[in-house]
Amino acid sequence: MPFRESEFIDFNTGTVKIAPMRLAILLPRPLQLADKIRLFQCRIDVWNLGVAVQMLKTIEANEPPSIWSHAAYGLIAIGCSYFEMIGKTLNPSSQKLKTAGTDFNYGFCDVYAEHAPSSGSYDDAHLPLVKEFRDRVHSGIYHLGGTRRGLWIHNEPNISDKDFDVVQKFPADPLRDKYYVNPHSMVRTIVDHFPTFIERLTDPSATYDPMRQKFQEFLSDFREA
């Protein structure tokens, strides 16, 4: 299945149309909000999502004993950073420091709306399943060098057609859940999701004014943390 179109990169061939540093030089100064959003979109499409897509294609084009058969951990590391990154803008209470968990929850639930809390509260107490995945995947890879116990990485639709799923209990321990992540489909999901994030930032409706305000804080103050 081909990847979406982008002004900045051909995801299908891996060809960069315009690099972020080149775009930054070409944009007139001082940068207006629309320019800042466009530059941000270029950075994420090229430096984050573009890299993840090329990793995904290389993984799928190789077989063991190639090192690419073990590269899903790297793919997850790039992919899961997306949730926290967009969450910094989506979380109205995000700060430079100490809100990473809640930021992740906001981003994850924006991508996977079925997990969005009916209460409107994105703290861990209202999102226990999201916290379980965050601790096992995100925190495991970044802090421990590998996913935590109880998590399986797969690319088998017959196991689950969801990117993140709790599939079954351990037969020997019915109280212990098995958590599954499909990084292949996850990357495709976030690549398709990102334009919806940008569309809200560029939508002139006053509904998105708080989001734009947080985005500008994200670009300025947060980058100085």
Image (spheres, rainbow, N blue to C red):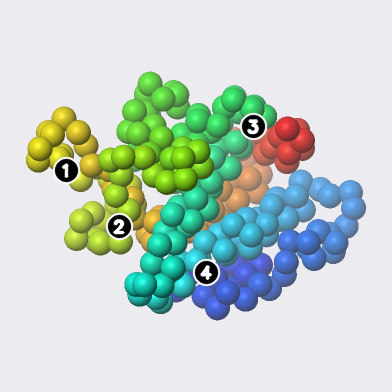
Q: Earlier in the sequence, mark 4 or mark 2?
A: 4
Looking at numbered disc 2 in the image, what kind of residue is underneath it?
A: His
Image quarter of residue 95: top right
Q: Earlier in the sequence, mark 3 or mark 2?
A: 2
Q: Which mark is residue 210?
A: 3
Q: Earlier in the sequence, mark 1 or mark 3?
A: 1
Residue at the spot of label 1: 168
Q: The N terminus is located in which quarter? A: bottom left
Which callout, 3 or 2, points to the residue nearer the camera? 2
Residue 89 visible, this angle: yes
The image shows residue 223, relative to residue 35, as above or below, that is above
Q: Please rate how many residues cluster around mark 3, counting C-alpha atoms within 10 Å: few if below 14, some from 14 to 19, many from 20.
A: some
Q: Which secondary structure, mark 1?
A: strand
Residue beneath the point at 55% across and 32% down: 100
Does residue 134 appear to the left or right of 203 in the view shown?
left
x and y percentages locating residue 222 in the rendered image:
71, 34
Residue beneath the point at 44% across and 54% down: 73
Residue at the spot of label 4: 54
Q: Which secondary structure, mark 3?
A: helix
Residue situated in front as seen by the camera: 149 or 199: 149
Residue at the spot of label 2: 154
Image quarter of residue 155: bottom left
Residue situated in front as seen by the camera: 46 or 172: 172
Instruction: Give the alpha-carbon distance from disc 4 to disc 3, as whole Å.
Output: 34 Å
Instruction: Give the alpha-carbon distance from disc 3 to disc 2, as whole Å.
Output: 38 Å
Which callout, 4 or 3, points to the residue nearer the camera? 4
CB under 8 Å between callouts 4 and 1?
A: no
Residue 130 visible, this angle: no
